[in-house]
Amino acid sequence: MLKKNKRRINKCLEECNAICCHDLAVQIYKPVTKVEKEDLRWHLFFEGVKVFIAHRKWHLLVHSRCRYLSKANLCTIYDRRPDRCRKHNHPHCELEGKYYETMLETPEQFDAYFEKEKALQQKKKRLIKN
Ligand code: SF4
Ligand code: SF4
């Protein structure tokens, strides 16, 4: 157990510049109504803000930097870090690549996602009718 933990810490220290301490991911509801969609779309007007879907759950992603991260990219409150940080461990993390099914970075990508979804729903309805 100790050995496994040591390896995880080494991986964080040796091969990663604390990617997870530079991203604030907040789980949100999938927008359903026109107002909800317009509101979330507006968030994508801002640089550094993205929306991603992982395991069918929607998240708002804000690129920022934790104020407790040192210049050397080390956690300065490691022993007191919140549970959320403790539970986010290698290899189930950003270092290992794609952690999402869909990443929406711009309002145009947001529109394209819902246009595609609408087209799929219309196709399903046509198939059910026939
Ligand atoms: S948990 Fe993953 S993303 Fe975070 S510092 Fe460790 S290797 Fe990097
Ligand atoms: S508290 Fe520490 S582990 Fe958590 S995000 Fe900040 S620097 Fe990273």
Image (tube, rainbow, N blue to C red):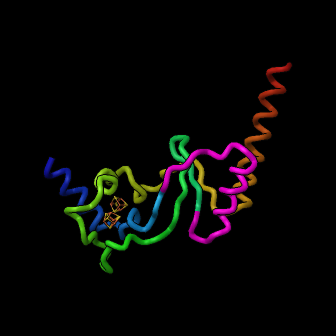
Q: Quadrant of residue 29?
A: top right
Q: Any magenta on residue 27?
A: yes
Q: Ligand 1 appears in which quadrant?
A: bottom left
| Most foreground residue, 15 or 71 | 71
Residue situated furthest left in the rendering: 2
Query: Which residue: 45% across, 64% down?
Result: 23
Query: Which residue: 43% across, 68% down?
Result: 22
Work out whether 87 lies above or below 12.
above
Residue 101, given in percent of the width and then of the height, sits at 56, 47
Q: Quadrant of residue 117?
A: top right
Query: Which residue: 57% across, 53% down?
Result: 52
Judged left or right of residue 24, residue 74 is left
Work out whether 6 lies above or below 114.
below
Judged left or right of residue 47, residue 13 is left
| Most foreground residue, 100 or 86 | 86
Give the residues in magenta: 26-49
